[in-house]
Image: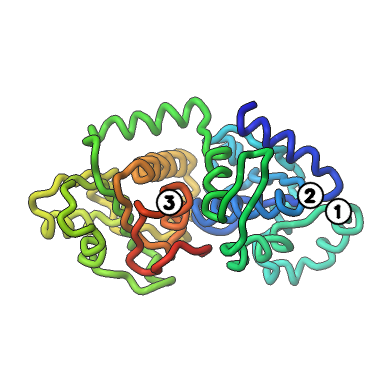
Amino acid sequence: MDLLERYKKLNISFSSRKVIFHIGAHAGFFSEYNNMILTILYCLRNEMKFVLYSKDANFGYDKGWTDYFLPFTEEEENRFHSRYNFRYAGVTKTLRPQVLLYRLFHPNTFLTFEILNRARDKKWEEERYNIPELGIDGNLREACRTLVDMTWRYNVFTRERVQDLITSLHLPENYIGFHIRMGDKITETNLLDVSEYIKKIPSGYPVKNAFVLTDNYWVIEELQNRLEDWNLYTLCGKEERGYFHEEFQKKKNPELIRKSHEILFASMDILSQSDLFVGTFSSNPGMYLGMVMPPEKTFSVDVPHWTVW
């Protein structure tokens, strides 16, 4: 039986308790996605049914999750979750009466903020996961990799668009992947010079092709100055000078949202197939790639080891 079908069967069997995870309510796509993966794993370990709410997802342009991906679980439709089901408990303090009323009628249903901190606790990094129904038998990274395989399945339209973007680059067979984030990342951590990324390439490594995911074309220009004999590939436009999530969300342009996420997904697919990846584990794209790629192929310029971020 296909992994997805096995998961659906197992998830439905957890009928006594459930978690309704509100995706796309707060942060950028990979922050939301990584937390979803950790929550799915938490639910599996604790025999809780995982249900998705994505009707108002900030990455969606029509329906939410299924704008890009195949459904993998039941989707909640109640708009209560758009107003009261958030990832941070602090947001709900002024909404306590509504949440308590919901709890009265749904005593065995848990909201995102009630589960997320437990699901992303760093102590789980030391655990070994054994879920034979899904073929999971390994550490946290390995368990998450299986869940990514299960959920990262494009619908037909997205698959075609993403493939067209990848094909347009005419990538060589062998290349190194870089993720160098600028924009609002400076509000979370000190940005590193591009030379720090270059230093992570093993000495004498023969490949001189690189795909670069960045939100600022200055990074491409700077890399080209430092790696004169390299071939650089990117889907970043020359006009791009940094991504700022709050500013992007204000535009609320469905076509812009769709295209920007298709470019992001294509870029991440390319990075996941690179010979080596160099980025930051303190960013959610880096955390994601640390889950899906073998550890020996991933190098971080800021955090020495992959961790829940």
Query: Looking at the image, is 219 positioned above or below residue 210?
Result: below
Separation (CA) of disc 2 from disc 3:
28 Å
Q: N-terminal of the two: label 1 or label 3? A: 1
- The circle drawn on residue 18 is 2
Element type where label 3 sits in the image = helix
* Furthest-bottom residue in this view: 190
Element type where label 2 sits in the image = strand
Q: Are marks 1 and 3 in contact (CB under 8 Å)?
A: no
Indicate which label's residue lies in the foreground, 2 or 3.
Answer: 3
> In front here: 185 or 82?
185
Separation (CA) of disc 1 from disc 3:
34 Å
What crowding class fits label 2: few (fewer than 14 Cα within 10 Å), some (14-19), or many (20 or more)?
A: many
On screen, residue 266 versus residue 51, left or right, reads left
User: Residue 151: where, in percent of width, then height?
Assistant: 57, 39
> In front here: 257 or 24?
24
| Image point (86%, 53%), residue name | 108
Kindly identify the amino acid type of the residue bearing the numbered disc 2. Answer: Lys
Q: Name the residue tied to disc 1.
A: 108
User: Residue 175: where, in percent of width, then height?
Assistant: 24, 44
Q: Is residue 230 visible?
A: yes
User: Residue 193: where, in percent of width, then height?
Assistant: 24, 68
- The circle drawn on residue 289 is 3
Q: N-terminal of the two: label 2 or label 1? A: 2
Kindly identify the amino acid type of the residue bearing the numbered disc 3. Answer: Leu
User: Residue 200: where, in percent of width, then height?
Assistant: 26, 62
Q: Are marks 2 and 1 in contact (CB under 8 Å)?
A: yes
Kindly identify the amino acid type of the residue bearing the numbered disc 1. Answer: Asn
- The circle drawn on residue 4 is none
In which quadrant of the rendered view does residue 300 lie?
Answer: bottom left
> In front here: 42 or 27?
42
On screen, residue 82 versus residue 288, left or right, reads right
Element type where label 1 sits in the image = loop
